[in-house]
Image (cartoon, rainbow, N blue to C red):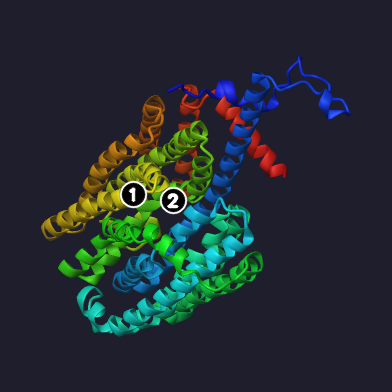
Amino acid sequence: MKKLSCRTWLPRIFHKSSKSKQFTENRDNNPPLTAADTRAAAGRESIQGYEKYTKDTLLVGIAHLLFNLRGLILLPVLTKMLGAELYGVWAQLLATIGLLAPLASLQLNQAMTRFLTAREDKQEIGKGLSSILSVMLVTTAIFSLLMFLLSGDLAKTVFGGLSSAPFIRMAVPLLFVTIIEERFTRHYFRSFRQIKKYSAFMMLQLVAEIGLVSYLVLAGFGLRGVIYAMLAARLVMLIVEAALVLPQIRITTPSLSLIKTYLVFSLPLIPFMLCAWIVGSSDRYVIGYFMDIDAVGIYSVAYNLGNVVNFFIAPIWVVMLPAITSLYENNRMHELRVHLKYSLKLFLALAIPAFVGLAVLARPLLAVLTTDEFVESYLVIPLIALAMVLFGSSTIMGNILVLVKRTKTLALVYGGSAILNLVLNIALVPAIGILGAAVGTLATFAVHLIIMRRIAFRALPFDTDPRFIIKGIVSAAVMGAVIFWLNPSGITGIVIAIIVGVVLYSGILILLKGISREEYRFLTGMIKRSIKS
């Protein structure tokens, strides 16, 4: 396979051939396109496509990063005002919504992206969206009712007792609104690459949730205030998004044939997402069963800090699938491999130093953001952070299987990982407590990445740039050593250490030529043009 060089394709968009012919008003007198002209046109199309992809990724990246920082911004308020027990209940509620969401939506949001992104006929798109929405509304209502009816059993099993049942019932409307908002209206903007709107709604929701949650919790409404604040913010987002989406589509009667086609694709993704939930969230249920709800709260805080690394895969994942789907459908395989390569490279360029920084700053961060009862869980943070580096890499490779419609294989891979993770949690949590859950998660993601890479590369191999990975690790290691030497404490010291680390890591990576000159010019030029526009 011919290796793509940025030196050959990045400058083409700016290249003007000295041999170009003057066009006359008579089109018939124009000379035929040469092979060089055709290649130049293809090069311009390629760079323009990747530039849009990169712009979208950066835009969504900023929105996702800030949106996911919501949990960290609210962490001091929630941990200090609620305590470990009620924070544990809140963590279990989020885990429960994460469990029920793929079941209730039937993963039809993924069918929206896979089948409707490349369509141009509005009537066809409207028929497909109407079919998806009708099914999703019915199934979401059913699962919301089940959550309400089973609130007592859930409370006794994994929520620390019947006293948690009222909170579970209060969260039922939150489940319904969250699924429709995240998996239909907002997902519409993602599928049809309306990235500015997608990002804008994330930012609006971020501001609304932080403001409402902080106000109600500090006003003494406790966990009830958290639930009501989240519900109000997401309900407003749903109404506004629907007002923008509905005029763009033609609502029609659902099509049974389309529903069948979509379900054939999406249903195998349900066990996949359930397995992903088991891998990512079942540890809280295991901790709640074998230990207590306080331990769930303490572990969740450390997990959320380690999970910061996962923030970097979210924007890439959001933009990536619609982009590579379009390339795949148009048989532009060379550009498709370029997107895969640079998606992985971009993620690792951010995730590797984030892991090292979190490992060094774990204890100071907990001391600043939480109370004393949470600090001793600091060893969980580096284990989870490293696990997320592995998971993010496997997620990019897993998109290949979605692209080639091997969703059953993807489900099997996640199924095996889920079983492994559950077994490790059950074995390790009773023995070494919450640290056992973190060890189990890291071991699971390591095995998961090995298997995913092997299967995905059989379907569509691409360049993973191992030399860049080595340079990134070296740069991050030096950065980590300097931060450890600084030994920061307090919010000011941590912020200064982070700034020093970012500058140091970036400088060393550039000196090691981890990022080529052409890539650097491309990215900086693209950012400048984005700011101007």
Q: Looking at the picture, which amino acid does disc 2 mark?
A: Phe
Q: Where residue 362 is drawn, which disc sits there?
A: 1
Q: Looking at the picture, which amino acid does disc 1 mark?
A: Ala
> Depth check: 260 or 140 in front?
260
Q: Residue at x 37, y 54 (%)?
A: 305
Q: Position of residue 367 (x, y in %)?
A: 35, 56
Q: Where residue 414 is drawn, which disc sits there?
A: none
Q: Secondary structure at mark 2?
A: helix
Decide if residue 192 is on the left or right side of residue 306.
Answer: right
- Most extreme residue toward the right is 25
Q: Residue at x 64, y 67 (%)?
A: 244
Q: Is residue 421 above or below residue 524?
A: below
Q: Secondary structure at mark 1?
A: helix
Decide if residue 262 is on the left or right side of residue 326.
Answer: left
Per the model, the C-alpha gap separating discs 1 and 2 is 17 Å
Q: Position of residue 375 (x, y in %)?
A: 29, 57
Q: Is residue 190 above or below residue 95?
A: above
Residue 260 in which image quadrant = bottom left
Residue 468 visible, this orientation? yes
Residue 487 visible, this orientation? no
Q: Position of residue 190 (x, y in %)?
A: 54, 55
Q: Residue at x 26, y 64 (%)?
A: 284
> Depth check: 141 or 162 in front?
141
Q: Residues within 10 Å of mark 2 (few under 14, many from 20)?
A: many
Q: Residue at x 44, y 40 (%)?
A: 347
Q: Is residue 165 above or below residue 277?
A: below
Q: Residues within 10 Å of mark 1 (few under 14, many from 20)?
A: many
| Position of the C terminus by quadrant | top right
Residue 261 in which image quadrant = bottom left
Contact check, label 1 and label 2, Cβ < 8 Å: no
Q: Where residue 311 is drawn, which disc sits there?
A: 2
